Image (cartoon, grey):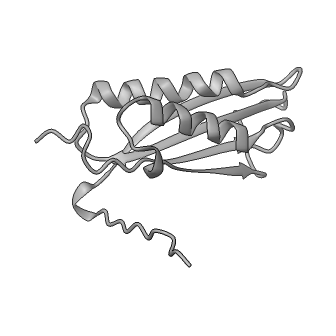
């Protein structure tokens, strides 16, 4: 069964280390949503993204300044591996473009696509009522 475009519903969670002082979560989320909408796999209204700042974090064991930004894109199961790989590369490309690195800080960017079991996922969309 091909599920490339049916029931599209991506959930994007962006985590970043608190030492990224110039991290503009709103701008990065907008850029990610725009990229996902443009890719042709999702309807614009179905893209849900959120950002979580991690105050307690560690990158490796060194005391040198290090930071991270990690994106997890959750999509319904059934898409081809090539599609999932292209989506993670697209998300990573946006992060590379929009994540500034503070001077002297080693920054790691990463992205992954995870699948949500199609059979157990439920969703309801409630449109605003007109007055």
Q: Is residue 125 left or right of residue 13?
A: left
- Seen from the viewer's position, the closer of residues 104 and 86 is 86
Q: Quadrant of residue 104?
A: top right
The structure residue drawn at horizontal position 89% and vertical position 21%, both measured from the top left corner, is 103
State the residue lying farthest toward the front.
131
State the residue lying farthest toward the bottom.
131
Residue 96 shows in this picture? yes
Quarter of the image containing the C terminus? bottom right
The structure residue drawn at horizontal position 72% and vertical position 43%, both measured from the top left corner, is 25
Q: Quadrant of residue 83?
A: top left
The structure residue drawn at horizontal position 84% and vertical position 29%, both measured from the top left corner, is 65
Q: Is residue 121 above or below residue 56?
A: below
Q: Is residue 1 above or below residue 120?
A: above
Q: Is residue 35 left or right of residue 95?
A: left
Residue 20 placement (x, y as % from top left): 81, 36
Q: Quadrant of residue 30?
A: top right
- Seen from the viewer's position, the closer of residues 32 and 72 is 32
Residue 58 shows in this picture? no
Residue 39 placement (x, y as % from top left): 41, 29
The structure residue drawn at horizontal position 28% and vertical position 29%, both measured from the top left corner, is 81
Q: Is residue 54 left or right of residue 8?
A: right
Residue 99 placement (x, y as % from top left): 72, 28
The count of marks equals 0
State the residue lying farthest toward the left.
1
Quarter of the image containing the N terminus? top left
Residue 127 placement (x, y as % from top left): 46, 68
């Amino acid at each position: 069964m091909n599920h490339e475009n049916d029931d599209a519903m991506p959930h994007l969670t962006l985590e970043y280390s608190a030492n990224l002082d110039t991290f503009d979560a709103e701008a990065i989320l907008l850029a990610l949503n725009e990229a996902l909408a443009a890719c042709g796999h999702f309807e614009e209204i179905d893209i849900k993204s959120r950002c979580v700042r991690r105050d307690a974090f560690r990158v490796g064991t060194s005391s040198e300044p290090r930071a991270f930004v990690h994106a997890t894109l959750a999509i319904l199961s059934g898409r081809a591996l090539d599609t999932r790989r292209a989506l993670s590369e697209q998300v990573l490309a946006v992060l590379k473009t929009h994540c500034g690195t503070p001077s002297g800080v080693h920054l790691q960017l990463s992205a992954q696509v995870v699948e949500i079991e199609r059979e157990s996922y439920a969703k309801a969309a409630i449109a605003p009522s007109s007055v």
